[in-house]
Image (spheres, helix red, strand yellow):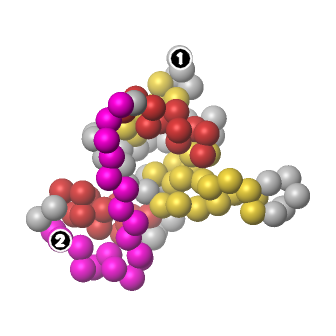
Amino acid sequence: MKNKNLQSEQLEYHEGSDTWSPKKDFLIGKIDFQYNENQSLGEPLIVIDGIEISWDEFAKTILIHEGFYFRLKFIDPADILSLDNNDETDSTFKSVAAASQLH
């Protein structure tokens, strides 16, 4: 697994199971992609706090919440400034998005 030595405010790495788990009940990140061996578009790549997580690794990351319900919210980068500062996920998203633009 890549990036397992990186520090994250949202994720913690478990060496024994070689998986990441969320530190809170929500994750904020970016959807990217990785090329396959033919240099064509491959699977999605999830980036959380600068940590690149493959689609399969992300499935293992969220498996800790098996049986839970979830809310999935997509936010256009152009809409970041209009998010609600009184909502914990929106205000956290603003700070995470601002930090990720530095990478």
* Residue 94: quarter of image: bottom left
**Which stretch appears magenta?**
67-85
Q: Position of residue 91 (x, y in %)?
A: 22, 63
State the SS at label 1: loop
Q: Is residue 76 magenta?
A: yes
The mark found on residue 16 in the picture is 1
Amino acid found under the numbered disc labelled 2: Asp
State the SS at label 2: loop
Residue drawn at 36 percent across, 49 percent down:
27
> Looking at the image, which residue sits at the far top?
16
Q: Position of residue 72 (x, y in %)?
A: 37, 56
Quick one: 89 or 69, which is closer to the camera?
69
Task: Give the labeled residue for mark 2.
Answer: 84
Q: Please state if 70 lies on the left or on the right of 41 as rendered.
A: left
Q: Position of residue 12 (x, y in %)?
A: 41, 34
Amino acid found under the numbered disc labelled 1: Gly
